[in-house]
Amino acid sequence: MDIKKHPHNVVFFFYCHQVSFVQKRVINRNNKPEMNLTKTLRKQGYDLIEGPIRNHNLLQLWLKTMFNDVELYYAHLQHAFTSSVVLYEIENQALRIDATTKDEYGFNIGISLLEDILDSLGLGEFKMSLEIVSGKKVSISYDHSITKEIPVGEIQNYLSNADFKHPNKALLKNANKNNILIISGILFAKNLVVEIETDFSIDSNFISDLTNLVDGKLNFSILSENSFKMVSKGKSFFPVAVKASRIDFYKGHFVNTDLVTDNRRFF
């Protein structure tokens, strides 16, 4: 096309291209489940806990070998290492989440994840999949959060001046192979908040039946004709996400720590 001869056609072409691009972005955004909670945590170096185990604590050592799931190795750093450095816990005021930061899933995936979470919170007897067999989507979020951390520099200082608590060939082998992860941060919350969009009409009788099934341990409320919300009672804090680093050893000497939970899903 000769731009000098047809300037208006060129402008029209670029206008149509921009409109098409915007429409595609809107369509993709509307169809793709939102993962705002996961993204928010990742940016802070945290990995969202999805499994049924929720016994995480600061300074736990976890073992991650190739082709195997992560497993608890030592309940506390001081059970494996001894050092003259004193470690102090702090509260990270910059990392707090509420129910507006959520992850959205397709119905069956969301219900599967939800049942694992309920199981970890002591509500495993309540099987949501038996009460709602079909639907459109599930969103999961948390409310009333607090974040506890041990500064990574202090952990590195501790390990730089550390020795094993006693001779331990297995610990040395895993340390030299960089198989050990240390938890330096945990985000806790008091409330699990779930929104479920069904493919049927919700009424007060349905909400009442769900409330009776959980013996009042969860609060249910109607959001719309076919959507409802479920909120845990929030009597105590529970772990939601962890910040962990791999301990780098070389021939029996501590080298560094490498953050893994900003881009790996171990927990």
Image: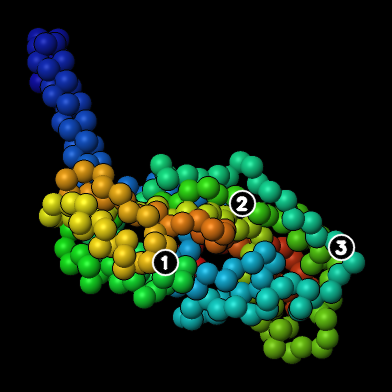
Mark toward the start of the polypeptide (1 vs 3): 3
| Local secondary structure at mark 2 | strand
Q: Which residue is mark 2?
A: 147
Position of 230 relative to 12 (above/below): below
Specify whether 207 is left or right of 53: left
Horizontal placement of 200 versus 83: left or right?
Answer: left
Relative depth, front residue between 86 and 63: 86
Q: CA distance from mark 1 to mark 3?
A: 36 Å
In the image: residue 82, left or right of residue 114: right
Q: Residue 221 location, x and y as percent?
A: 30, 49
Instruction: Give the spatial CA distance, label 2 vs label 1.
Output: 19 Å
Residue under pointer 3: 85
How has the structure been colored for display? rainbow
- Asked if the residue under mark 3 is in contact with the one under mark 1, i.e. CB atoms within 8 Å, the reply is no
Crowdedness of circle 2 by 10 Å Cα count: few (<14), some, many (20+)?
many
On screen, 99 above or below 161? above
Q: CA distance from mark 3 to mark 2?
A: 23 Å
Task: Give the residue type that dot 3 points to.
Answer: Val
Residue type at mark 2? Thr
For residue 225, what is the image quadrant?
top left
The residue lying at 13 percent from left, 11 percent from top is: 7
Q: Residue at 79% of width from left, 67% of height from top?
A: 159
Q: Is 46 on the left-hand or right-hand side of 26?
A: right
| Residue ID for mark 1 | 117
Q: Earlier in the sequence, mark 3 or mark 2?
A: 3
Residue 103 can be seen, yes or no? yes
Marked residue nearer the N-terminal end (2 or 1): 1
Q: Position of residue 167 (x, y in %)?
A: 82, 88
Q: Residue at x 61, y 51 (%)?
A: 147
Residue 105 position, x and y percent, is: 29, 56
**Picture quarter containing residue 124?**
bottom left
Asked if the residue at tag 1 contacts the one at tag 2, i.e. Cβ–Cβ closer than 8 Å, the answer is: no
